[in-house]
Image (tube, rainbow, N blue to C red):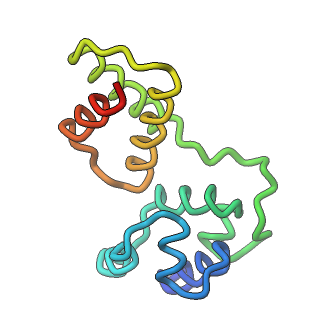
Amino acid sequence: MQTIDKIIERLIIASGAKNQSEMLRIIGFSSATASSWKNRGEIPQGSLKRAAITCNVNFDWLMTGEGEMKSTGQSVLLDRELMQEAIITIGIVEDELGIKLKPEKRAELVMMIYDEYAAGVEVETAKVIQLVKLAA
């Protein structure tokens, strides 16, 4: 396993950023994310998958530094279980609230929740309820 600092260096390269702060902003992570990774001693795979998709780079290169940097588009980085969980979560909340979202709004919320799951964030039901109400 590569050190966190080496992976962060590759994230900076992949994002085209000048520094760590800019990289975090480009990929869509909070400014405290890298500190959190270093304190935990690991970068969640969901965060790396999100970064690989955002930067269009090979997930394996991001993890190890080996192979081609640019994604060939042949590997699917979507975590099907997380996507299913996001879809089910939105559906349950819609049912509980008696709300039927328009398909484009539901799709947008599913991707938002998926991104949270993929980044290793535990999504509270109250947050999902609030998001569904806002989208309705």
User: Going by the image, does 43 lie left or right of 124?
Assistant: right
Q: Quadrant of the C terminus?
A: top left
Snapshot quadrant of residue 63? bottom right
111 shown above or below 71: above
Where residue 89 appears, as percent x and y from the top left, is 33, 28
Where residue 1 appears, as percent x and y from the top left, is 53, 75
90 shown above or below 24: above
What residue sits 49% from the left and 71% below the top?
A: 25
User: Going by the image, does 97 lie left or right of 46?
Assistant: left
4 shown above or below 125: below
Where residue 90 appears, as percent x and y from the top left, is 35, 27
What residue sits 58% from the left and 43% below the top?
A: 78
Snapshot quadrant of residue 112? top left
What residue sits 80% from the left and 69% below the top?
A: 68
What residue sits 50% from the left and 86% below the top?
A: 5
49 shown above or below 76: below
Count the marks. Answer: 0
Which of 129/71 is in front?
129
Most distant residue in the left direction: 126
Where residue 85 appears, as percent x and y from the top left, is 39, 32
